[in-house]
Image (cartoon, rainbow, N blue to C red):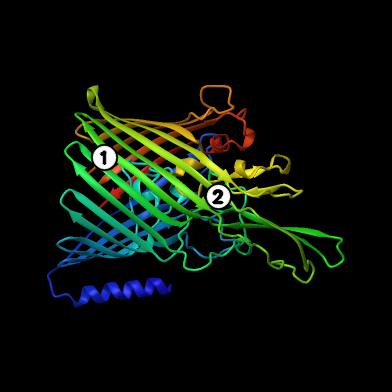
Amino acid sequence: MRWNKLILSSLLLLITTSKSETINTYKGYVDFYYISRLSDQSIINLPYRIFHLNVDHQNGDLMLRSTIALEHKLRKDTYFLSNNSPTDFELDMRELYLQMFTSWGEIRLGKIIHTWGNADENSPVDIASPFDYYYTFDSGIDKKLAIFSSAIDLYMEDMKLGLIFSPLHNTHRTPQNDDEFPIKLPVSPSEDQIMKIDGLPYELGAYINRSFSFGDISLNYFTGYDRLFNLSGVNVFRNKFETQTDIDILYGYRNTNMIGFGSTLFFGDLELRGDIAVFNTEDENKNISREHPKFPEVFDSLHYSYPLNEKAKYFQATVQLEAELPFDIKFVGQFFNYDTLDYSSDSLPVNEDISIPNLEINVDELDPKNIFTPGYGSSLAIMTKKALILSLEKKFFDDQLILTASSIFDIDNTDYDGTYPGSILSFEAAYTLIDNLELTIGYTNIKGDKDHPLGENYRLYIMEDFSHIRADLKYSF
């Protein structure tokens, strides 16, 4: 709250002290959404944005930008038996920042959603803003979260230089213990299980972009602490009589540096986009010794302490091809690949099963390399290491009707006896009923082979129950 008040006060002060002519603009939408499972037609009760409003206030070279949304979720208790409150929505200040234009570029300060990368979706360099996993299947900034930050963009003929700084550690929004959400995290650590970051957990990013007649190229750099928590180590306690043992599992956020390269190239009616990034990550929790977080008077003896001391290098890449096919059909294809290049850690000599993000591990199979989870990069990395994404779009009646067919194929067949172990197939029809009023009907079918090497823990197999039909009535203004 302190950061919110400080930034808002600064923005209002700068706006009100300017004497230039003011211009106010606004736009938004109201959205009524329905989604139900194919398996039993039950409603999937996930939050969605029922109301969205953008308000811009310009005063000369200064602009105050804001985005406000109402997030709606159906009440679990519709009979008001356990909760008498009629409220079923939350107000979300999505963005609020000041933008100042100069002769050499622009400056932004406040709560901002940042977008990086050349690929339209799933870019591994698009990491400046965290993901909201509730909106995984949305596109663009709708699935991202704003961060309190400052940004500078410098323009120099055919070059653009950008800088981003945030004094805060920003994490993904991951559903905790939500049975409705299709992507499960097998563990929800309590706050006392998370190791605190020493010092200022700042995030710093920079990029340079150069344009040419045939396209452009870009170079990106980012450093910060991971968006997802990971296993950091284990403490073993015993009571004063040495008759009982208790294992204290600790989680933390690794420090990660990213170097990325991207390009957009034009070949007539073809457009080729791509981003590749290499990440170096390290767990800075070298010493995890502490007293027992819950029962220090009972388990008063720390017998063993095993920090994981993870270090890893991994890469992610996305290549995108866009083309206009016969009959005015728009084609978009993407190939995504992720792999670990180098990994080192200490061993964890524990004697009971443990849970870590994205994977449940039996102690007999415990190898830290097998449970490594990337804390930055594309959101696709939580589902697969290799994917093929295809999309076809056709417009009719002067764009009044838009038909879209899209698919995601998990083509990582490592140790899998088959072509591909899982897929997500979607079909969507959007029809403009009258000006600014659009009805969208969609169908999504998710398949995952339970004979995958991960068995019933295979991500797409778990997600099968999320196969659904949906209807969306949106009024824009």
- Identified by mark 1, the residue type is Thr
Q: In the picture provided, is 139 more to the left or to the right than 311?
A: left
Q: Quadrant of residue 95?
A: bottom left
The residue depicted at 68 percent of the width and 43 percent of the height is 366
**Observer able to see residue 407:** no
**On screen, residue 462 above or below 23:** above
Residue at the spot of label 2: 311
Element on which disc 2 rests: strand
Quadrant holding the N terminus: bottom left
Along the polypeptide, which appears first: circle 1 or circle 2? 2
Residue 272 image position (x, y, % from top left):
28, 33
Question: Label for residue 399?
Answer: none
Residue 51 image position (x, y, % from top left):
35, 56
**On screen, residue 193 above or below 228:** below
Residue at the spot of label 1: 432
Viewer-proximal residue among 472 and 296: 296
The residue depicted at 69 percent of the width and 49 percent of the height is 348
